[in-house]
Amino acid sequence: MPNTSLPEDRIPVIVGVGEIADRPKDIAAGLEPLALLEEAVRRAEADSGTKLLGELGSLDVVNFLSWRYRDPEKQLAARLGANPAHCYYGPVGGESPIRYIHEAAKRIARGECSVAVVCGAEAQSTATKAERGGIALPWTPFAHDVEEPKRGAAFQKPMAVKLGVFRPITVYPLYESATSAHWGQTPREALAESGALWSTYARVASGNENSWLKKRFTPDEITTPTPENRLIAWPYTKLMVANPTVNMGGAVLLTSLAKARAAGVPEDRLIYPTGGASAEEPRDYLVRDQFFESHPQNAVLKAVMDLVEGDGKKFDAIELYSCFPCVPKMARRTLGLGPDVQPTVTGGLTFFGAPLNTYMTHAAVAMVRSLRKRGKLGLLYGQGGFVTKHHGLVLSREAPKGALAQDTSVQAEADRNRRKVPEFVTEASGKGKVESFTVIYEGKGEVEHGVVMLRTETDQRALARIPASDTATLAHLLNMDRTPVGSVGSIVTAHDGVLEWRVGSAFFPSPLVGEGGSNERTLIRDG
C-alpha cells in the first residue's frame, strides 16, 4: 500500500511501457512511423495488464523526421480508437519525451485526465534505404504540403552556416574542446575519458534486446579513426556520435493511482514520477556567454538533486543524454559523479540507436523496467538542440509524500548565472584568442577545414576558418598533449570575406591548472 495521504486519483503513476525495433528483410515491408507508434502504444497497454486506452485523455507524440504526416497525433488517436482532449504533436527537441511525461503526470495531478500516453517513433533506416534503392513505400502518402520542422540551421547566424558549424555534429565539438580545457585536461586525456564512457554505453546496449547495435567496443576501438570509424568533426569519430538510421517506436502509459489500483495493477509494477525541472539556453548558440558549462543544465540537475538529497537518498539508476560525449561528461560533473559512473540503463544514442527526438522515450521505458527489478530511485535527463533545452525527471518505486509540483521551471536560476555575452562580429583583425574549435572532415577522412571560435582584442566573438592547406595551424589545433584553447594567433580576411586564423606566438593556460581543473585531473587519472 502506498504511504501517502494524497487523493489517489491525483497521484500519477506509470503502469505500462512498450517499444518496438523493426528490422525488415524486405524494405517495402518496413513499418511506417504511425504503425510503429501504434504498436508501441498497444504494447504499453499490454504491459500494464489492463485496458486503459479507451479512456485516453492525453496523447503526446514526439516529433519525427523520417516521414511527414498531416496531424499525426490525430491519425494515431484514430488508430487507437481514442479522442483525447489533449492531443499534441510537438516541435523538434531531444528533451521533449521527458518533458511530455512530466507534463502528462502534471495533468493527472491536476485532475484534467486519468489516462495519458507519451510516444515517439522513427523509421529512418527504412526510409533511407528505400530512397537510395528507388523503392516506393506503401505508407501513408508523404504530406508534401506540411512544413518541415525547424532545426538547428534555422536558428543560427549565417556565418555559422557558411562555415559548417550549424549541425549537432559540428557544434557539440565546440563544447567538447572548451569543457576539457576548462577541466584542465589535455586532448589526449579528454579523448580517453570519452572512449571509456562510450564503451560503458556500448556494454549496456549489448544487453538491451531492443538495441540497434548489440556489440561491445573497447575505448580504443571507439576513439581510433579507421576507414569504418572515420573522423567526422574533431575529436568525434563515427562511433562517438548519435546513430539516427534506425526503425524504432516507444511508448509510456500513465494513469492515476486510483485507476491503477481499481484495475488491479500490482504494486510492484507501479513507477511514480515524483518531480523534475526544465530550463533552456538561447537557440542561437553564438549568443551564449561561454562553452565550458551550461547554466540551464546545471540548474536542472541541481534541482533534481534537491528533490532527493533532503532524505539522504541517491539515484539507483540514471540516464544521461548521450548524443555526444561532452553532454554526459558535463552532466556527471554537475551531479558530483566520478568517471566510473554508470550513465545509462538504455545504451546511448550511438549504440542503442538514436530515433532522433525520441531516444528518451526508450530511456524512460528502460528506466521503468530497471526500477521494477531493483532500486528505488531513477533520474532521466534529456536535452535537445545544441546543449539548448534541458529537462530532468525523477522516477520512484515509492509513492510521493506530497503533491506533484506544477511550477518546475528553473529558468530564473539559469539566467541569474549567465555572464556578459560578447558581441558577435564577422569583421575583425589583429590577434584572436581561441575560445573553442573543431576540425571538419570529409567522407574519406580528409580535412575539409578547421573552425575556431575566437575572442578578439576588444573581447568580441568571431568565427574563423583554417583552410586545409594551413597544415601548421591545423597541427597546432590537433596537438594531443596541449589544448589550443587560450592560444593566440593572427586574424586575417580571406578573398571571400571570411575571417581566417593563423597560429602565431601562443599563450597557453597552464596544462595542469584550469578553473576547477586540478581536482578534475586527479579524478581522470584515478578513474
Image (cartoon, rainbow, N blue to C red):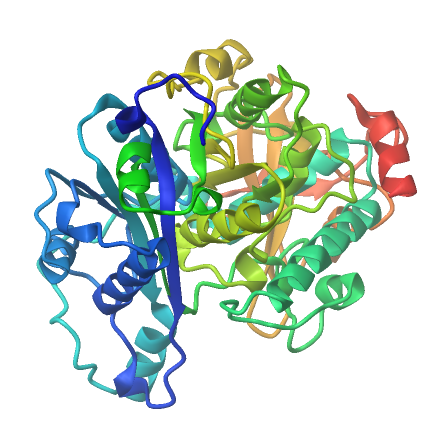
Question: Total number of numbered labels?
Answer: 0
Residue 205 falls in image quadrant: bottom right
Vertical order, 244 against 377 (above or below): below
State left or right for residue 519 relative to residue 240. right
Residue 261 falls in image quadrant: top left
Nearest the camera: 301 or 5? 5
Vertical order, 65 against 109 (above or below): below
* Image location (x, y in percent) of residue 330: 65, 35
Q: Residue furthest top?
A: 416
* Image location (x, y in percent) of residue 412: 43, 11
Vertical order, 115 against 370 (above or below): above
Q: Is residue 270 visible?
A: yes
- Which residue: 31% across, 74% down? 127
State left or right for residue 405 relative to residue 366. left
* Image location (x, y in percent) of residue 426: 47, 32
Look at the image and tell me in which quarter the N terminus lies: top left
* Image location (x, y in percent) of residue 209: 53, 69
Nearest the camera: 245 or 307? 307
Residue 408 falls in image quadrant: top left
Q: Is residue 432 visible?
A: no
Look at the image and tell me in which quarter the C terminus lies: top right
Nearest the camera: 123 or 471? 123
- Which residue: 36% across, 51% down? 16
State left or right for residue 52 relative to residue 100. left
